[in-house]
Image (tube, coloured by chain):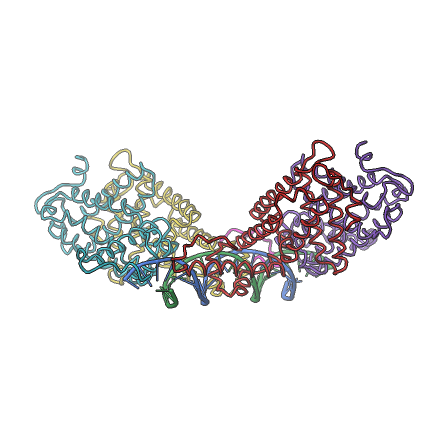
Chain colours: A purple, B red, C cyan, D yellow, E blue, F green
Amino acid sequence: MSTDSSRTSRMPRKPVQARSQERVNRILDAAEDLFSLRGYIATTTKEIAIQAQIPIGSLYQFFPNKAAIVQALFVRYNDLLHQQLALFNHEELAELPLSTLVDKLTDICVQFFLEHPGYYKVFMEVQGLMPELEKIEDAADAKLIQEFAMLLKQREAIQEEVDYEAIAFVLSKVSGQLIWIALSQEERFQQQLFAEIKRFSLSYLQSYFSSGLKSANNTYESDHGSS
Amino acid sequence: MSTDSSRTSRMPRKPVQARSQERVNRILDAAEDLFSLRGYIATTTKEIAIQAQIPIGSLYQFFPNKAAIVQALFVRYNDLLHQQLALFNHEELAELPLSTLVDKLTDICVQFFLEHPGYYKVFMEVQGLMPELEKIEDAADAKLIQEFAMLLKQREAIQEEVDYEAIAFVLSKVSGQLIWIALSQEERFQQQLFAEIKRFSLSYLQSYFSSGLKSANNTYESDHGSS
Amino acid sequence: MSTDSSRTSRMPRKPVQARSQERVNRILDAAEDLFSLRGYIATTTKEIAIQAQIPIGSLYQFFPNKAAIVQALFVRYNDLLHQQLALFNHEELAELPLSTLVDKLTDICVQFFLEHPGYYKVFMEVQGLMPELEKIEDAADAKLIQEFAMLLKQREAIQEEVDYEAIAFVLSKVSGQLIWIALSQEERFQQQLFAEIKRFSLSYLQSYFSSGLKSANNTYESDHGSS
Amino acid sequence: MSTDSSRTSRMPRKPVQARSQERVNRILDAAEDLFSLRGYIATTTKEIAIQAQIPIGSLYQFFPNKAAIVQALFVRYNDLLHQQLALFNHEELAELPLSTLVDKLTDICVQFFLEHPGYYKVFMEVQGLMPELEKIEDAADAKLIQEFAMLLKQREAIQEEVDYEAIAFVLSKVSGQLIWIALSQEERFQQQLFAEIKRFSLSYLQSYFSSGLKSANNTYESDHGSS
DNA sequence: TATGAATGAGACTTCATTCAT
DNA sequence: GATGAATGAAGTCTCATTCAT
């Protein structure tokens, strides 16, 4: 109890801040675990503190209330997802066939949802109950959608006046939902669903774009048939 | 609606049973209102009773606990949606062009979601927290998907070995999700999203089916261009 | 409602009263069952009515409240026990050896407790909570004790100034308690306890009385050894 | 009592733990009062908290539910009774005349029941409704009975194959019951009953044992007559 | 008289947040 | 700062009894 005060001011810089950061992370890790298991409302702040191995009082030094924890957690989720997707956001992406693009992006999202099963679940749970969280999500989504739209703009559309953002909006929402549903299905059907997600996304995109960049012309059949 | 007509006209109209049914309906109406407004967990049974204008004790005469209320509400939701969709389940449906089919079905679902904004919201909120409810939803979904799959089976598939149920599964989940998201968007974008739902549904189906029944051959462009 | 008034005054006498009596009995039977199973407080009046197969409203026509049911039940218990014991209350009883007397009376009580496991249990449960019931029990006990004391008075006491009622009081209470405890023990130990009840009753009585009536002189050992 | 002394005298006396212990005691005291007055079921947790002068929330920090309170109370009861009886558990006990032994033990029990009128009452009330409590009581009883049996084993039995535990079982149950009943009787009769309890116990023991240890030979009459 | 739906006070328990140490 | 015991409003559900039909 009263021990542990052995730290002197000579130690590596910002020990407090480092300790704080570590504690914040532990709290978010604990919250992620528990939220994905029991849901946001059913999880108590005390449980989070215990799981994070810090006193409940300390938790409230970092977060003013329970809602702030989910919000911080979702900021972290969004950063992470954005990071994963950014790895592919190179110029070359625009050159890939549509089917390859769809494949890559879908795989990244599937991976993310697999590693963070609470992401979608918690967000759905508190829809309409936490305007703050929705603002965070909307902003992050908007950013992702914008970037995806930029990617699409580099491709040759079949028709004029394509609303790239609408397409990006639709695909991001729809893929997320479907991936999440797939996660709770049995292995075989899950794999089938992942394939369908790609087919779905591709056929939707092909209704707007020829498959490649400015000149390529991969039809759906040829793409798909070759795989 | 037209059910429950087992009463012969000679009886004094069982005022008690009628009153009970009316009360159950009032409870479900109140629950629907409050759940869609505040969510399931944040709504108290007392609030429901007050909104339904009955004493709390009476509420518990009809429902053993709070969970039973949502469950009954979802049974009602499912019945209703099924009724709406069943109106179109005539033989002629199979003869319609794919685009028309998609239009009709989507419109029905949009209408349903507009009238019952709590349906999707509440279900998402309690995902993973109420196995009973999930069983109810899974059963209802399975039924709808099955029927939709039957519809598709009457059409000429482009390729062999089509998994009609998987297609029906994907489309029902994806359309539901996007309709729900659309509902919280501003009017103009909402309308645009409804159009996109039809577009992606159609393009997805066209990746499997030629447009008409056995002989018709409407491509996507012609369908869409004519609208 | 207005139906069922078909009964005319010509029918067999007291049909109503007979029906009432039957209903009262059914209520008491149901109450006995449920009380002995779950206890008085945990048993609801509705459960009693259901078990008795009568409407709850009818129950309240016969009993003003829940307490009145236990009270009536205990009046019935007491009548029954008194009847059982009265069968032996003949003049010859006084002539039996003490050990025989103890045997007979104990056996009767054991039998009664076996057939009515709720008797003791319920009485203990509501001790101090229902003055009315205690009055009933005290009166019945007093009567039994009085009669038992009368029996003892016919025997030749060893010492002067014997308080027959105190002896009867002690034995009745103590035997009842131990029989009840024995009922929840496993078969073998239960039988052993029944034997011990007889032994302590006899040894206690022998500290006051010579074994027989005026002249007999059975000591404990001889009594016991002969059995 | 003498436990928990692991605290070294240099520390600031852990005010928190002391405060906790005091609160637990206050809760148990309050529960004892109210249970013995109104019974377990009729006593509300709120009442207990008020009587203990702590907020209801604090009560639930120490006890997970109402049942845990009675259980803890009975652990305390059993400890206390065992302590009282242990004071006499010296070697000399075996040397005392039976009558003296009975006197002492009975007096201790009478004293205990006088100071804790709720002990018997509450236990009887919840018989069959709280398996947990019964386990606690059975264990404590078994311990007491075992010890009492050990005491008896040191005495010279009249007959062979005496089941010391059965005797101890019977006497402990029967004395408890009779003392409890005596407590609700008017003063004069109460005193008389206490005397009868001793007589009863002694005559029962004398049916098994000669009065003293190996050689002594005090008959009941001489013992009793001398008092 | 017979019925059973209706009533609502009140029981037990939880948990986000605070604040004395 | 750090700690975790303390707080009490509020939620879910029960049930003896009544009374309109």
Is residue A219 magenta-colored?
Answer: no
C164 relative position to A53: left or right:
left
Vertical placement of D41 versus D149: above or below?
Answer: below
A79 relative position to D47: left or right:
right
Q: Position of residue A187 (x, y in %)?
A: 67, 35
In the picture as drawn, the residue positioned furthest to the left comes out as: C215
Q: Is residue D108 visible?
A: no
Q: Position of residue B86 (x, y in %)?
A: 60, 48
State which quadrant residue D138 falls in: top left
State which quadrant residue A17 falls in: bottom right
Instruction: Out of B154 and D8, give the one closest to the viewer.
Output: B154
Instruction: Out of C146 and B216, give the one closest to the viewer.
Output: B216
Q: Is residue D154 visible?
A: yes
Give the number of callouts.
Answer: 0
D178 relative position to C46: left or right:
left
Prevailing SS of the magenta stretch: loop
D110 relative position to C155: left or right:
right
Q: Position of residue B125 (x, y in %)?
A: 63, 53
Instruction: Out of A98 and A75, give the one closest to the viewer.
Output: A98
Is residue D9 magenta-colored?
Answer: yes
> Which region of the structure is painted magenta?
D1-18
State which quadrant residue A84 falls in: top right
Q: Position of residue A16 (x, y in %)?
A: 78, 55
